């Protein structure tokens, strides 16, 4: 049975309305997403995780399942490409796309650089607002760039797509832009993006594994600063080497290997917030760079497994309500996470929206409440070896 895409689009629109995703600040977004629905930019094969690996869903042989995957949820990305068993491109979650484009504050006539074309959907939406010929887009994967060109032309959108590494490139055409919209995650912002944007211009980008940020370029063009806008998880920058360890349980086991704990102690703390409190998760993401936390709740309570590319820690829930902490490697990640949690409590349990980021040519840092006077944490590239503690 062929699915009714119009009905699925209407259901998505209604879900976004209930969420409050259609803001008064950017009424054009709802119109653009109606005129340029994501199914027009989706490939004929999507990919779904089945518990052991990613399996293809073919539109030709299973159109109903393909459509359900594409419109599964306003918060769900649709995986469009798998490389070496891992997702390498996706159509981002509609709610996140809307949030980021709302944060970008595009006006008609703005010149927009869309960084990471993918299937071309975000470039199309930006062009709907900015106008014909006002959007340039860069994609490192030549196959994806070709695909996006075809879909953009079919949608009647005039936008330029080039195949290049946007992390190190200047926008096509060589002129400064008013807005940069990045669709892949970077831990540190390439300073070339600051230089490519006019003073007073805006850059919205996914910050590493969690959250997206809107930066405003300073009047002198030598720095940028701005607030965290929300949560979101994106594909990583392909131009940098992948971290040695994957995320989740498999990453933890790969880093730990057969190693015995170097330290062990009992912790009197309920770990449930590590599983449920997204503001806490974001605060830990800021204060303990590159640490990845995986949780599970069982009969004894919530347990947590923490790792980066070099160190590991496990907080295993016990029957008496405590947790057993054991850890190893150059960083005492368990101690650092617990100390950062204590600091987050002392700071008044700030929300993700209380944080911001400043970028200069020589350094980048996250801050809380005030870019000048608030607490700050240095941001380092993903592969920088952590200091021993």
Image: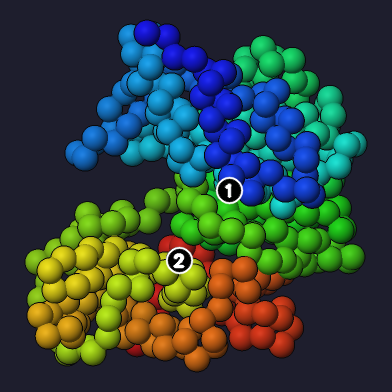
Whether tag 1 and tag 2 are in contact, CB under 8 A, the answer is no
Q: Residue at x 33, y 66 (%)?
A: 275
At which x and y percent is residue 44? 44, 16
Give the number of the disc on residue 19: 1
**291 up-or-down from 161: above or below:** below
Total number of numbered discs in the rendering: 2
Which quadrant of the structure image shows residue 169? Answer: top right
Q: Residue at x 68, y 52 (%)?
A: 204
At which x and y percent is residue 294? 29, 63
Is there any visible trace of residue 35 in the rendered image? yes
Is there any visible trace of residue 162 in the rendered image? no
| Residue situated in front as seen by the camera: 333 or 41 | 41
Give the number of the disc on residue 183: none
Which quadrant of the structure image shows residue 322? Answer: bottom left
SS at mark 1?
Answer: helix
**343 up-or-down from 72: above or below:** below
- Quadrant into which the C terminus falls: bottom left
Q: Earlier in the sequence, mark 1 or mark 2?
A: 1
Camera-nearest label, 1 or 2: 1
- Marks 1 and 2 sit apart, C-alpha to C-alpha, by 17 Å
Badge 1 density bin: few <14, some 14–19, many ≥20, Cα 10 Å: few
28 relative to 150 in the view: left or right: right
SS at mark 2?
Answer: helix
At which x and y percent is residue 142? 55, 25
Badge 2 density bin: few <14, some 14–19, many ≥20, Cα 10 Å: some
Q: Residue at x 43, y 33 (%)?
A: 72
- Quadrant into which the N terminus falls: top left
| Residue situated in front as seen by the camera: 66 or 12 | 12
90 relative to 41 in the view: left or right: left
Give the number of the disc on residue 278: 2
């Amino acid at each position: 049975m062929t699915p009714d895409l119009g009905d699925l689009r209407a259901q998505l629109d209604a879900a976004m309305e209930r969420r409050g995703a259609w803001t008064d600040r950017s009424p054009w977004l709802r119109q653009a997403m109606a005129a340029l629905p994501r199914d027009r930019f989706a490939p004929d094969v999507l990919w779904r995780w089945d518990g052991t690996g990613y399996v293809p869903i073919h539109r030709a042989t299973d159109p109903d399942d393909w459509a359900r995957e594409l419109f599964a949820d306003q918060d769900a990305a649709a995986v469009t490409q798998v490389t070496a068993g891992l997702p390498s491109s996706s159509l981002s979650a509609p709610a996140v796309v809307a949030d980021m484009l709302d944060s970008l504050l595009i006006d008609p006539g703005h010149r927009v650089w869309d960084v990471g074309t993918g299937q071309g959907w975000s470039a199309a939406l930006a062009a709907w607002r900015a106008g014909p010929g006002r959007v340039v887009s860069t994609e490192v994967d030549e196959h994806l760039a070709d695909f996006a060109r075809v879909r953009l032309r079919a949608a009647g959108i005039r936008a330029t797509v080039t195949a290049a590494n946007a992390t190190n490139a200047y926008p096509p055409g060589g002129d400064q832009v008013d807005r940069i919209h990045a669709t892949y995650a970077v831990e540190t912002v390439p300073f070339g993006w600051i230089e490519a944007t006019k003073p007073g211009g805006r850059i919205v980008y996914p910050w590493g594994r969690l959250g997206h940020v809107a930066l405003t370029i300073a009047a002198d063009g030598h720095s940028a600063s701005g607030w965290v806008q929300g949560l979101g998880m994106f594909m990583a920058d392909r131009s940098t080497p992948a971290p040695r360890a994957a995320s989740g349980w498999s990453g933890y086991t790969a880093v730990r290997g057969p190693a015995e704990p170097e330290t062990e102690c009992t912790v009197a703390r309920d770990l449930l917030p590590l599983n449920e409190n997204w503001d806490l998760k974001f605060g830990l993401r800021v204060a303990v760079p590159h640490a990845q936390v995986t949780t599970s709740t069982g009969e004894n309570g919530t347990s947590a497994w923490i790792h980066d590319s070099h160190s590991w820690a496990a907080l295993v829930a016990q029957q008496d309500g405590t947790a057993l902490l054991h850890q190893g490697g150059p960083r005492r990640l368990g101690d650092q996470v617990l100390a950062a949690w204590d600091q987050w409590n002392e700071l008044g349990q700030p929300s993700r929206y209380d944080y911001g980021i400043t970028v200069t040519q020589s350094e980048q840092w996250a801050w809380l409440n005030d870019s000048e006077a608030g607490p700050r944490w240095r941001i380092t590239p993903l592969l920088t070896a952590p200091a021993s503690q």
